[in-house]
Amino acid sequence: MNTSASAGVRRGAPVIAGRPPDAHPVSAPPPEPAAEPAREPAPESDGLVPARRWRLGRGASIPFGRLLGPLLVVVVWWAASATGGLDPRKLPSPASVLSSAHGLWTSGRLQDSVQTSLTRALLGLVIGVAAGVVLALAAGLSRAGEALVDGTMQVKRAIPSLALLPLMILWLGIGETMKVVVIALGVMVSVYVNTHAALVSIDARYVELAEAQRLSRRVFLRKVVLPGALPGFFTGLRLAVTAAWLGLIVVEQINATSGIGYMMFQAQQYAQSGIILVGLVLYGVFGFASDALVRLVERRVLSWRSTITT
């Protein structure tokens, strides 16, 4: 036996194959903790409701949802008339209104009145929108333009169009020009206020970014300011459409010889409530349809914008 080799080995030291005797022993890695068993959801009988993720938005849109309210009004009106809850001398039934509309259509009065009213409203709307946009650009893009235009427009905003009728009749007479001008004035104010507010409320960070990118003023207006003002313009356009119909009702009730309002005024003289309701229904249908058309154009033009209304 080799006594020198055995002497070099310390007594009681374990010998591990492939490892020097003097090395420290390797400790085993700690055992991994046992996985907790999956918890089963509490039964509904305990009165507990499983966790649910609530949506903060308004949810999916209802197809043709805006028609439900008017249809409900018609159904209630029809039911009240059928059960005798409404006096037919004050508010005739929907069937009586349809009969009056059919008589007007057969005689040709309805077509002529609708064409005249639509022409007035469309001319006033186009002229008013064009004037409102031009004035808003002049006041929103320069301090000098704002000083000259904004104060005057705010004064006009405080004066109702009905108060201008005596002066418009004195200046322009009682013809078509006066009626179109009165409608255009109401439209112009609605477009101006909303478009000007959108132009002057562009985020200052966009201005700083455009300066950092060294954009010219023309490019800045075309790429940043005008697209940023489009939502405000469309809001003003929707209000302008309503203002056009309101102005049309006013001018056709005073010194008019044609149109839906004149037809209603004539029916008032002879207590023909059915014809009056036909005119009201036409105003409502045209107003609803024009607003829906503006909303459709807005969604197409502003397709890059994501809101909870889309």
Image (cartoon, rainbow, N blue to C red):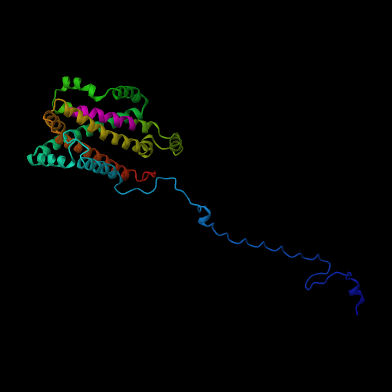
Rendered view: 68 above or below 50: above
Rendered view: 284 above or below 139: below
**Residue 279 in the image: x percent, y percent?**
17, 35
Between 257 and 130, the one lying in front of the other is 257
| Quadrant that contains the N terminus | bottom right
Q: Is residue 163 magenta?
A: no
Taking the spot 18% from the left edge, 28% from the top edge, the residue there is: 251
Rendered view: 10 above or below 251: below
Give the mark count: 0
Taking the spot 37% from the left edge, 40% from the top edge, the residue there is: 223
**Residue 56 in the image: x percent, y percent?**
44, 45
What span is in magenta?
179-195
**Residue 42 in the image: x percent, y percent?**
54, 56
Q: Is residue 186 magenta?
A: yes
Which residue is the extreme one toward the left? 107
Taking the spot 33% from the left edge, 32% from the top edge, the residue there is: 194
Q: Is residue 25 visible?
A: yes
Which image quarter: residue 104?
top left
User: With 218 as the anchor, is 256 left or right in this view?
Assistant: left
**Residue 29 in the image: x percent, y percent?**
72, 64
Between 268 and 112, the one lying in front of the other is 268
Which residue is the extreme one toward the front? 84
Which image quarter: residue 109?
top left
